Amino acid sequence: MTDTAVDPRLAAIAALLKASDAVAAPAAAPVTLGEHIVEAARVPARHREALLKLTPAELTCMRFLGWGRANPDIATLLMISENTVRVHFGNVCRKLELDGMRELAALAGLLFYPSD
């Protein structure tokens, strides 16, 4: 076999790989969290059930956190007290079994930070 000769088995494998790349994988249906629609790939499987049980106020606070807003900003935008925002975040951490605000902020960013 010379260097320029192509093994027919390798050519067949290459053709199969090209064909498999051309087939688009079906997109998973988006997940609806209250009034918020999130790409399914962004929702961790271990939190999926618990996220569906959050209140609309908790989800809205979490969305603003995911956009990078601080507690005082979220309170002003939602016309609630800063203490209420903290209570919502505490409830979310408890319901999702998170260890604190760092994990909550990371999850909120994963779920709600714009992808484009």
Image (spheres, rainbow, N blue to C red):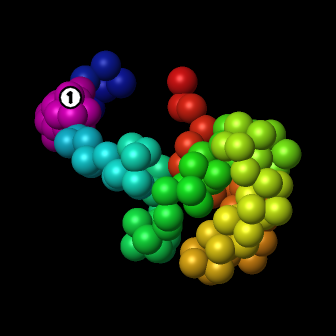
Q: Main secondary structure of the magenta part?
A: helix
Residue 78 horizontal/vertical position (percent):
67, 43
Between 83 and 71, the residue placed more toward the observer is 83
Q: Tell me the SS state at disc 1.
A: helix
The N terminus lies in which quarter of the figure?
A: top left
Instruction: Identify the amino acid type marked 1.
Output: Ala
49 shown above or below 114: below
Residue 35 horizontal/vertical position (percent):
40, 46
Residue 24 horizontal/vertical position (percent):
21, 34
The residue located at (25%, 47%) in the rendering is 29
The residue located at (54%, 24%) in the rendering is 116
Between 22 and 64, the residue placed more toward the observer is 64
- Which stretch is magenta? 6-24
Magenta run includes residue 50: no
State the residue position of label 1: 22
Magenta run includes residue 10: yes
